[in-house]
């Protein structure tokens, strides 16, 4: 936690822009640090990937926190990969990653407009055309190794539309792609 004499670990949002709650971010980072230093911690790369914080005035700048979380996730994923390789060996680790990649590819191979569940009639979801463009790029990465970075997948954003794709399903596939990418690095 920061106080008035300790410099904040991240720049603060200014003006009308909101940022992540410093109290929540600081608590999460302390928990992540403790888990990284302890063999039986409760935080892993998946927890970091899905971390969410309330937006508040004068909070930490979203981009700065997200970038730091990306680096922390990379460190956790590398450690988890090394541990899994030590326990099960490279063949099992690669096999497990291939299975996840195939599940994602099966989803992305569905016809355009039908790759994910749609939200209700009066609800907003991710724009279908934008998600389908990204899904095609992800499929090409998984099928033929078309260049794509983890940062590109992490930073993808979609506009909203009525009856769009379910945010939860799309985000889960993006998370799975990041997991596959980090597993094979």
Image (spheres, rainbow, N blue to C red):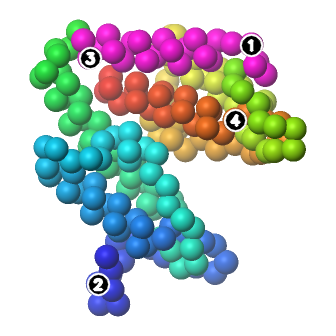
From this viewpoint, is residue 149 visible?
no
Q: Earlier in the sequence, mark 4 or mark 3?
A: 3
> Taking 85 as reference, is 127 left or right?
right
Quadrant location, the N terminus? bottom left
Residue topped by disc 1: 111
Q: Where does the image place residue 83, in percent across and percent down from the top left? A: 16, 29
Give yes or no for residue 30 being in the magenta stretch. Answer: no
Q: CA distance from mark 4 to mark 3?
A: 30 Å
Kindly identify the residue that appears in the image at 75 percent across and 41 percent down: 125
Where residue 88 sits, quadrant-wise, is top left
Local packing at callout 3 (Cα closer than 10 Å; few below 14, some 14-19, many 20+) is some
Kindly identify the residue that appears in the image at 64 percent across and 12 percent down: 109
What element does badge 1 sit on?
A: loop
Give yes or no for residue 99 being in the magenta stretch. Answer: yes
What element does badge 3 sit on?
A: helix
Local packing at callout 4 (Cα closer than 10 Å; few below 14, some 14-19, many 20+) is some
Q: Nearer the viewer, mark 1 or mark 4?
A: 4
Residue topped by disc 3: 93
Foreground: 134 or 23?
A: 23
What element does badge 4 sit on?
A: loop
Q: Earlier in the sequence, mark 1 or mark 3?
A: 3
Q: CA distance from mark 1 to mark 3?
A: 30 Å
Disc sitting over residue 166 in the figure = 4
Q: Nearer the viewer, mark 4 or mark 3?
A: 4
Q: Which residues are magenta?
A: 92-114
Residue 174, above or below 34: above
Kindly identify the residue that appears in the image at 35 percent across and 60 percent down: 28
Residue 71, above or below 24: above
Residue topped by disc 2: 6
Q: CA distance from mark 2 to mark 1?
A: 53 Å
């Amino acid at each position: 936690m920061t106080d008035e004499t300790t410099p904040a670990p991240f720049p603060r949002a200014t003006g009308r822009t909101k940022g992540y709650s410093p109290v929540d971010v600081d608590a999460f980072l302390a928990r992540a640090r403790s888990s990284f230093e302890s063999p039986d911690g409760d935080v892993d790369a998946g927890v970091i990937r899905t971390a969410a914080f309330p937006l508040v005035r004068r909070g930490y700048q979203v981009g700065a926190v997200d970038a730091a979380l990306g680096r922390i996730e990379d460190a956790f994923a590398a450690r988890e990969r090394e541990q899994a390789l030590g326990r099960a060996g490279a063949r099992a680790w690669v096999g497990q990653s291939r299975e996840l990649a195939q599940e994602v590819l099966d989803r992305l191979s569905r016809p355009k407009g039908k790759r994910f569940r749609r939200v209700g009639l009066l609800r907003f979801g991710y724009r279908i055309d934008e998600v389908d463009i990204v899904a095609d790029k992800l499929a090409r990465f998984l099928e033929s190794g078309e260049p794509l970075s983890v940062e590109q997948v992490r930073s993808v954003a979609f506009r909203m539309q009525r009856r769009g794709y379910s945010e939860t399903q799309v985000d889960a596939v993006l998370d799975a792609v990041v997991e596959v990418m980090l597993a094979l690095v």
